[in-house]
Structure formats: structure tokens, C-alpha cells
């Protein structure tokens, strides 16, 4: 049972089964249509034969031939009767002489019946000078020596003979040939249907296996890649079809995963490296204090503890941002936030020049994260400024711009993208005590981007660096 379920669950098996079923239905429908057309044509041919026989007999009677001297065809395949208006059999084949009329319909009676049922004029089949004719399929009391009793196509022809009599000539044409032909073709189709469906199933199975072979190669390669080696890639077939595009997209995804894994490994290594220094410093100071209590420096211990706390908070925030955490969508007055943040900065080395409008400058986002952006940018400016730092907040052209500039040495153009990478410090800021861990600007960029904004670095009017954060206003 499990093997059967596994077999049916494969795309190749389902495709083969469905293709075979569709072809079988199409062949059966086409075969039935062919058989119907074939029988219709054969029945029409028998009707023409019966009509020809009836008109031939009518021509003999019109020429004055006596009923007993009529030339009639073989009764087994073409029975003929000449019946008077009162139902007497005037002439017939030997097999039909002892029977009454082999049919009881006439073109005239059918025409009158149609007139009673419908006001439209009937459309009888007729020929010039030879009367009206009608057809019916029926079984006659004539048994063929090979086929036995079977159906006939009977033509009824009304005629008036020179003797002043109104007669009906019934001429039949055997439908055994039509029935045998249809039966033979049906048997041939039935016999040929099975091997044809087997051929279709086999071809579909082989073609599907060939088409899905690259998919299996991709699957097996992915199974091995997921074991840990993200540098490998799945094979791309040369077919330039959907499977090739799937392989290309898979390789692109693997490249992105490899880069993400490499970034994660670098981040972990850098974080471990950054944490090692303050932890080692704390341990050293504690070991010294344990051996020489009089040498205990509480200020150093507190400074290293604060540094560890800030580094852990930065790492936690970056981890949350990497996990895709979206900021709150509260309405935040950026002007009030900036004034409150700058009012609590009492230990800055350089004065901060503030140019913030008095009215509300509202944006949407997380107040805590936006406050972190401003604090990190001001901290960065304080480390590089020569004499002063400037904070400017403006709203123009449907955007809110928060700019922090200094009068330091600025940021070289070649480094303006690199400084936003994690754990990156420029040459003059390599000291971990003065330059920080290199995470502040990385946090700023990630937070600004998740708030739908962007950050750009340029030169300030004072000659230093200018960091401009552009955010959409709250009313957009």
C-alpha cells in the first residue's frame, strides 16, 4: 500500500495516468463519431439502392409490364412488394408472396400526417414523373442464409399505373453490410485501442522522466547542500525552459543564503572579539582587586560594565532588526524628541547648536528607535568634531530632514558607504575606547530604512561631515 501511494505521488506517474486517460477519452469519442458517420453513410447508400429498385419496378409498371412478369431482385438482400391501395399484395418475391404487406407506410399518408401536425409544407423526397418516396428502417420477414433475420432500409414509392390503379411499391435494401462494416471497424478500433494507449503511456512516461531528470538533479544537489556547504550550486540545464529558470533562481537564493551566513559568521566573530576586550579588562581588574584590595578602581569597573551594557544592547537591537522586527507606527513629534534628547546630554565634549522649529514635525515610527538614531549620530559627531556639533530639523517638499553636522575632518567619499557596515572603524577611530564598537552607524542605517527613510553622508558647511536622515512625514 505504501509503495502504491509513493508511486502515485510522483509527478511522472500522475502525468502518465492523466495523459493516457485524456487520450483514451479522445480516442473513444473520435471512434464513436467515426462509427456514427460510417453507419450513416452506409444507411444512406442502402436507401439509394432501395429507391433505385423501387423506381425500376415503377418504370416497368409504367411501361405496361404485368405484375407476374416483373423483374425483381434477390429477395434475401433486396425484397420488393407491390401493394394496392386496399392493402393487397399484387406482386412480390417468392419469399414474400405468402405474407401481407411488408410495410404499412406510404409517402402520401406521412405527408397528410405532417399536414395535420404542422402548418408548414412537408418536404417529400421525389423525382420528376415517378411519385413521392419515403424511407424507414425495419426488420422484414426475410432471413438471409448467412446473417439470418436483420434490418432493412425500406423505400415506399407511391405511383399510379396505366391501368388506373394507385399502388405503393416497397423496396428494401439489406443493412447487414452496414452493420457488419460498423461491427468490424468497432472491433478493429477496440483491438487497436489497448496497444495505442500502452504506447501513449510509455511515451509519456519516458518523456516525463526525461523532462523531470533535471528536477531530480536539483533536488538531490539541494539535499546535499543543506548539509552545510552553501558554496555549492545546483546544475542548470541547457534547455532554457522553466526548469532552467528554476535552477537559476535556486542558485541565486543559495548565493543570498551563503552571503547571509557569511555575514552572520562575521557578525558573531566580530561580536565575540568586541566582547572579549571589556570582559578581559573586567577580569583583570577583579583579579588585581582580589590580590590587592587597595588597588581596586571602581571607576574603571563601572566604565567597562557600561561599555558591556551598551555593546549588548547594540547587539540585541541588531539581532531584532535582522529578524525582521518592524517598528511601531506611532505618531512621533521629531522636534520634541530632538529637544528632549539633546537636553539630557550633559557630558558632551563640544557644544551642540540646535536649529529646530517650534511647531510640530510629525513622523510615524518608534520613538525609542528614532531617539537612538539621533543619539548615535550626535555621539559620532562628538567624537570627530573639532569645536562644535550642529543639529538641524527641517520639513521641505513633503519630507522631514534631520541633519547632524560637525567641523571635523569629514568622511572621505570612498568610505561613505563602508562606515555603515558593522564593526567598521575608520583609521582615526580604531581605538575601542574612543571609537566605540563600530555598531552605531550600522544601527542608524537599519533603523532609518525600516522607517521608510534613507541616510546620506556629505560634507558640512564647516568642513566636516554631514549626516542627513530623510523620513516621510506622518500625513503621507
Image (tube, grey):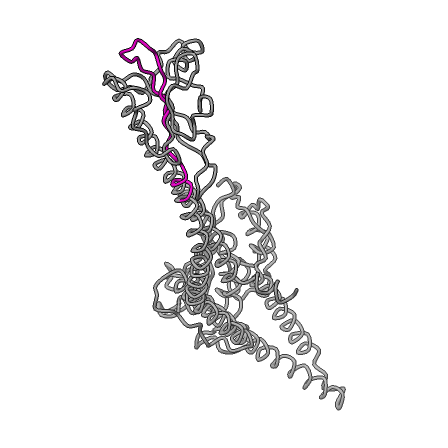
Q: Quadrant of residue 75?
A: top left
The single residue placed furthest to the front in the displayed view is 68
Query: Residue 125's quadrant in the figure?
Result: top left
Residue 134 x %, y %: 36, 21
Residue at image coords 46%, 22%: 100
Locate residue 288, reporting x and y percent.
71, 88
Residue 173 appears in the figure = yes
Q: Is residue 228 above or below residue 368?
A: below
Q: Name the foreground residue: 346 vs 429.
A: 429
Furthest residue toward bottom: 291
**At x 47% / y 53%, what residue is drawn?**
453
**444 part of magenta stretch:** no
At horizontal 51% and vertical 61% (from top left) the residue drawn is 11
- Tally the numbered discs: 0
Answer with the quarter of the image where residue 86 lies.
Answer: top left
For the record, the magenta segment spans: 155-180
Q: Is residue 407 visible?
A: no
Query: Percent position (x, y) of residue 171?
Result: 36, 27
Q: Residue at x 39, y 70 (%)?
A: 236
Where's residue 368, x and y in %?
61, 55
The N terminus: image quadrant: bottom right
Q: Is residue 147 above or below residue 327?
A: above
Give the left or right position of residue 413, taking residue 365 as reference: left
274, above or below 465, in the image: below
Foreground residue among 6 and 473: 6
**Horizontal side of residue 366 vs 55, given as left or right:** right
Decide whether residue 175 is among the magenta residues.
Answer: yes
Q: 160 or 381, which is in the foreground?
A: 160
Amino acid at each position: 500500500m505504501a509503495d502504491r501511494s509513493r508511486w502515485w505521488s510522483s509527478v511522472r506517474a500522475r502525468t502518465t495516468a492523466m495523459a493516457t486517460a485524456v487520450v483514451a477519452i479522445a480516442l473513444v469519442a473520435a471512434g464513436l463519431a467515426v462509427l456514427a458517420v460510417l453507419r450513416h453513410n452506409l444507411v444512406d447508400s442502402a436507401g439509394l439502392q432501395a429507391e433505385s429498385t423501387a423506381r425500376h419496378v415503377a418504370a416497368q409498371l409504367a411501361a405496361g409490364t404485368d405484375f407476374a412478369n416483373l423483374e425483381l431482385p434477390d429477395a434475401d438482400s433486396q425484397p420488393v412488394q407491390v401493394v394496392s391501395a386496399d392493402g393487397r399484395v399484387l406482386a412480390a418475391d417468392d419469399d414474400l408472396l405468402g405474407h401481407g404487406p411488408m410495410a404499412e407506410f406510404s409517402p402520401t399518408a406521412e405527408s397528410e400526417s405532417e399536414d395535420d401536425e404542422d402548418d408548414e409544407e412537408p418536404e417529400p423526397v421525389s423525382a420528376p414523373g415517378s411519385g413521392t418516396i419515403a424511407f424507414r428502417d425495419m426488420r422484414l420477414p426475410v432471413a438471409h442464409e448467412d446473417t439470418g433475420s436483420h434490418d432493412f432500409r425500406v423505400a415506399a414509392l407511391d405511383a399510379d399505373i396505366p391501368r388506373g390503379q394507385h399502388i405503393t411499391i416497397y423496396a428494401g435494401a439489406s443493412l447487414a453490410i452496414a452493420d457488419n462494416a460498423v461491427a468490424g471497424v468497432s472491433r478493429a478500433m477496440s483491438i487497436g485501442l489497448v496497444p495505442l494507449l500502452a504506447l501513449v503511456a510509455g511515451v509519456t512516461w519516458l518523456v516525463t522522466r526525461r523532462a523531470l531528470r533535471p528536477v531530480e538533479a536539483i533536488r538531490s544537489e539541494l539535499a546535499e547542500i543543506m548539509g552545510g556547504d552553501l558554496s555549492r550550486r545546483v546544475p542548470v540545464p541547457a534547455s532554457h525552459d522553466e526548469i532552467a529558470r528554476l535552477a537559476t533562481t535556486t542558485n541565486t537564493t543559495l548565493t543570498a543564503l551563503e552571503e547571509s551566513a557569511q555575514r552572520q559568521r562575521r557578525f558573531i566573530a566580530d561580536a565575540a572579539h568586541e566582547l572579549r576586550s571589556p570582559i578581559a579588562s573586567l577580569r583583570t581588574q577583579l583579579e588585581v582587586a582580589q590580590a590587592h584590595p587597595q588597588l581596586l578602581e571602581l571607576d574603571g569597573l563601572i566604565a567597562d560594565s557600561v561599555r558591556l551594557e551598551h555593546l549588548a544592547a547594540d547587539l540585541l537591537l541588531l539581532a531584532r532588526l535582522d529578524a525582521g522586527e518592524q517598528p511601531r507606527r506611532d505618531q512621533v513629534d521629531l522636534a520634541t524628541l530632538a529637544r528632549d534628547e539633546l537636553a539630557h546630554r550633559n557630558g558632551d565634549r563640544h557644544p551642540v547648536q540646535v536649529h529646530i522649529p517650534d511647531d510640530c514635525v510629525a513622523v510615524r515610527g518608534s520613538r525609542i528607535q528614532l531617539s537612538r538614531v539621533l543619539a548615535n549620530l550626535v555621539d559620532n559627531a562628538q567624537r570627530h568634531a573639532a569645536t562644535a556639533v550642529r543639529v538641524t530639523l527641517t520639513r521641505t517638499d513633503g519630507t522631514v530632514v534631520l541633519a547632524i553636522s560637525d567641523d571635523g575632518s569629514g568622511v572621505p567619499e570612498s568610505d561613505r558607504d563602508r562606515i555603515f557596515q558593522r564593526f567598521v572603524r575608520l583609521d582615526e577611530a580604531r581605538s575601542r575606547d574612543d571609537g566605540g564598537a563600530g555598531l552605531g552607524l550600522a544601527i542608524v542605517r537599519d533603523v532609518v530604512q525600516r522607517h521608510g527613510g534613507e541616510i546620506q553622508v556629505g560634507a558640512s558647511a564647516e568642513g566636516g561631515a554631514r549626516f542627513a536622515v530623510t523620513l516621510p512625514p506622518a500625513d503621507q
